[in-house]
Amino acid sequence: MNEVSELRRSAAISQLQSDGWLVHVDWLHEIDSTNSLLKRMLVDQASSSLPRLVVADRQTSGRGRGKNAWWSPDGCLMFSIAWRPDRSAQSELSEFQSRMSQLPLVVGVSIASALQSILVNRDTIKVKWPNDVYVDRRKLAGVLIESIVGAADPVWIIGAGINVLVDMDSAPETIRSRATSLHRECTSAASISLSMESILIAIVQRLCETLALWQANSDFLSRLWQDYCLLTGRWVEIQTSDKRIQGTCCGIDDRGALIIQDPRGVHHTILSGVVESWT
Ligand code: BTN
C-alpha cells in the first residue's frame, strides 16, 4: 500500500473512532473471514466492550448465507460489526427476541439507503428480502448475520460484503452475470471520489442511525423496508423450514415478514426462509 493510501486509511479509522459509536476498529490485510474472527474473539471475551468493527482487504474463506462461500476479491469492501442490542430498550424479552428477525432487513435497508445518493439511477437500488442489496437484477452487496450462542446478553455479528471497486470481468461466470459493483453503477462525479474508506464510513454511520431507530421501535423503518422491497409485485418461490411456497409478493409487513399470495388467493406470512427464485 502506498503512502497516500495508508494516510487515507488511518484517517478513516480515526474518523470511525471519533464518530463515537464503535469501541474498537481493526483494519486487517488478510483473514479467513471477518465474521469468523469476531466469533472467535467473542467466545473468549463475551463481556468485551462493543460495538467492534473488523474490516479486511482479503478473506481466504469468506462466508455467505447457508453453505455458500463469499467471493472476496480486491475491491470488495468486507467488514463485520459485533453488536450487543440494548435489551432494556424492549419491554419484554419475548418481544425483543421476535424483533431480532427484523435485523437482516434493518441492515439491508441501511446499506441501500447509504449508497443510494451516488447511483446513476437512485430508484434502482433495492433490498431482496431479507437482506441482499440489488441494483436492477444484479447483486451489489450481501449480508451475513450470526449470533454468539451462550453469551449472557445476545451478541450479533453483522457481516457485509459490498462490491465497491470489484472488476466484474475477473469474476467467475456464475457471479459475473448476476452481480454488479458500485463503480459500474455510480455517477461519474461520484466515481472520482469512490473509495473503500468513504463507503465504509457512509454505511457505518447509517447503520448506527438505523439501529438506534430500530431499538426505539420507530415506524419509519417499516416504511423504509416497504419502499426498498425488490420483490413486491413479482412472482417468487420460497423455501421455509417446512414448506415451499410460490406466489406473488405483496410486500413486507410491519413485523418484517414477507407476504406471498399463492395462486388460490391465500396469503402466507413468512418470517424466515430462502428466496429460491424470482422473476
Ligand atoms: C450472502 O450474500 O450470502 C452474504 C455474504 C456476506 C459476506 C460478508 S464479507 C464480510 C463478512 N465475512 C464473511 O465471511 N462474510 C461476510
Image: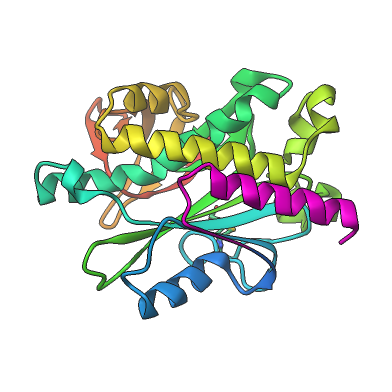
Q: Position of residue 53 (x, y in %)?
A: 53, 57
Location of residue 231 with respect to 154 vertically, above or below:
above
Q: Is residue 128 visible?
A: no
Viewed as shown, does residue 68 lie left or right of 272?
Answer: right
Residue found at x 64% / y 73%: 31
Give the quarter of the image for residue 123: top right
Viewed as shown, does residue 197 lie left or right of 49?
Answer: right
Residue found at x 25% / y 73%: 150
Q: Which residues are magenta?
A: 1-26
Give the quarter of the image for residue 262: top left
- Magenta segment includes 107: no
Q: Is residue 63 visible?
A: yes
- Magenta segment includes 13: yes
What number of labels is visible? 0
Location of residue 208 with respect to 120 vertically, above or below:
below
Viewed as shown, does residue 234 lie left or right of 201?
Answer: left
Which residue in the rendered view is the most extreme toward the right? 2
Majority secondary structure in the magenta region: helix
Q: Position of residue 160 (x, y in %)?
A: 55, 52
Which residue in the rendered view is the most extreme toward the bottom? 44
Viewed as shown, does residue 233 lie left or right of 69?
Answer: left
Of residues 98 and 194, the one nearer the viewer is 194
Q: Position of residue 254 (x, y in %)?
A: 26, 28
Which image quadrant shows ligand 1?
bottom right
If the image is split into quadrants, where does the N terminus sit? bottom right
Q: Position of residue 269 (x, y in %)?
A: 24, 36
If the image is split into quadrants, where does the C terminus sit? top right
Of residues 115 and 48, the one nearer the viewer is 48
Residue found at x 26% / y 70%: 151
